[in-house]
Each structure stands twice: as structure tokens, then as C-alpha cells.
Image (cartoon, rainbow, N blue to C red):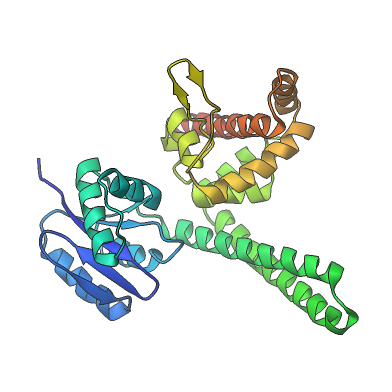
Amino acid sequence: MTSINYIAVDIAKDSFEVFSEFFKGSYLYTSESLKILVKQIRSVPSPLVVCEATGGYERELMFTLFKQKIPVARVNPFRVRAFAKSDGIKAKTDPIDASVLLRFSKEKHIKPTPPPSPKQQALSELMDRRSQLSGNLASEKNRLKMCTKRIQRSIEKMIRFTGKEIKLIEKQIKEIIKDDEIMCSQRKIMLQVKGVGETTVWSVLAYLSEITSLGRNQLVALAGVAPYNRDSGKWKGKRRIEGGRAKLRKCLYMAATSAAVHNPHIKAYVDGLRARGKPYKCAIVAAMRKLLVYMQSLLKSSQKELVS
């Protein structure tokens, strides 16, 4: 079995730090530096580049490596930081972070992240932009309620402009899904579920493309709706959800609140939990899990029918 040679890359806004057994160094985050990095990686047998999710800064690196067919893995930065703390490492610099990331990759046997299709990449970028614009629109509407007449026209102008931009983004999203046979089919299936609207469907397609290839436990953990035990001896702590894909979880929450009113099955489920003394938010998180697992089962059943 060929051993994997990990190459850790710690990414910042304008630079990145590389640490491996073969080469190391600091680079400016430019296209020229990425070309140099690719050339160095190609000299390494069985390489696997590992970077952290850094709010989007990692995208250019990953896109470049995917294009060059170089395996790359994106890991949760909280796991890496917890790993560092477990080893008593309190200092935090780019070289230290890169060396910790390399050790973490080796000890945890990190696997490559599957490369997204061009349409998948485009869809996630458009959904990110839609989310940014929606946040801006909500902020401007809130400002309008408390503004003076002097700035009212400016805010109204920005609201109209942002609304038009959102419509343009949504038009592109619809076109991408319409042009992809699998996405189009999955969209129709998920929309059959009461409480699940277009935004939730778009979020699943953009941020959870592997929905049909995961087991149930993997699915809810990846979405960040898996409850984790906090027990010790006779003490029973509250179960909590943590981690996962926040962008997806946000839309699932809205879908669950809608389903708790309009979907008879989810409504009965939520009402039952509330009757047993569960807090509203706990019941809604449980409804989020139920909705997600149900959507997955519908998609998997459709897949089996196509194969048979």
C-alpha cells in the first residue's frame, strides 16, 4: 500500500505557509505562488495537500489543485485547534499552525475532499452571494424603519438595487439546476415535502451534494443536527448539536419551522415532543433531522428506481 505524503498549507488572506517533510516556506497568496506550489507538489510521491476551512480564503488554492488533479483535503479548523491544545501548544503563528496541521493530518489519516463538478462549484458560489445580498437587504430594511428623511431615499435606492441583484442571482441558480438532469430531478423530489421550499432545496444541492452517498448518522452529523451526549457517571447533561455545515443548517431550521405548521407528520412529531416537555428549539432541531433524513430516503429511492 502506497503511503500518503501530507503537505500542510496554513492559509491567510494575503499569504500561506507550507509545511511538509519535503519542503516548507512562506508564500504570498498569488497565482504565481500557486504555480510554484503546484510544481513543488508534483515532485512529491503520493501527495495529499491539507488546508483548513478559512471562510472562503481556501477556495482559490483548492480550485487550483482540483484543476491540476492534485488531491486536497479541507478540514475543520476547530478540530485542528483542539488537537493543538491537547498537545499543550498554546502559541499560534503561521509556521506553528502549519506544523500542527501536518501532525494532525498524519495522526488522523485525513482523506481527500471529493472535487466538485463545475456546476456544483458555480451553484455554491451563487448561493453564497445570494446569502450575502439577503443579509445586506435585511440590514437596509431595518435601517429604513429608523432613518431620517435625509437618508431615506438613499436606503430605498439600495433596497431596490439589492432586490434586483438577488433576482438575477436566483435566475442563474435556476438555470444551473434546470440544465443539470440530476439536480433538476432531485429538486422536484425534495419540493414534494411540505415545508421544504426552493431556498432549502438550493442549499441542499449546493452544500450537501453527497446526500445520497452517506449513511443516516453521517448525514445528520455533516449537516450539524446530530445531538451529542454529555454524560459522566450518574450525571446526565443536555445533548447539544455542534459543528456541521452552518449554511445548510440555517435553511433547514426555516424549513422545519414551516413544516411544524403546514406538514401534518412534522407537526404531530413536534407537538408530541412539546407535550413531553421538550423546549421548542429542541423539537425544531429534531424536526430538522427528520426532514433531512426523509429527503434523503426519497432521493435514494428515486436513485434505485433509475438503476433498476
User: Can you say whether 123 is above or below 236 in the image?
Assistant: below
Which residue is situated farthest in the bottom direction here? 150
Q: Nearer the viewer, residue 136 or 214?
A: 136
Q: Is residue 124 left or right of residue 21?
A: right
User: Can you say whether 127 is above or below 75 in the image?
Assistant: below
Which residue is situated farthest in the right direction here? 149
Kindly indicate the quadrant of the structure image that contains residue 270: top right
The percent position of residue 80, horizontal first and vertical second, equals 33, 49
Q: Is residue 227 left or right of residue 84?
A: right
The percent position of residue 56, horizontal first and vertical second, equals 45, 63
Q: Nearer the viewer, residue 307 or 288?
A: 288
- Residue 69 visible, this orientation: no
Q: Nearer the viewer, residue 159 or 278?
A: 278
Q: Which residue is drawn at 67% across and 63% down?
A: 135
Q: Residue at x 65, y 62 (%)?
A: 170
- Residue 257 visible, this orientation: yes
Q: Which residue is drawn at 19% across and 62% down?
A: 19
User: Can you say whether 212 is above or below 23 in the image?
Assistant: above
User: Can you say whether 87 is above or below 217 in the image?
Assistant: below
Q: Is residue 258 left or right of residue 37?
A: right
Which residue is situated farthest in the top direction here? 234
- Which quadrant, please, contains the C terminus? top left
The percent position of residue 163, horizontal first and vertical second, equals 74, 69
The percent position of residue 108, horizontal first and vertical second, equals 25, 41
Q: Which residue is drawn at 25% across and 45% down?
A: 87
Q: Nearer the viewer, residue 51 or 120?
A: 51
Kindly indicate the quadrant of the structure image that contains residue 189: top right
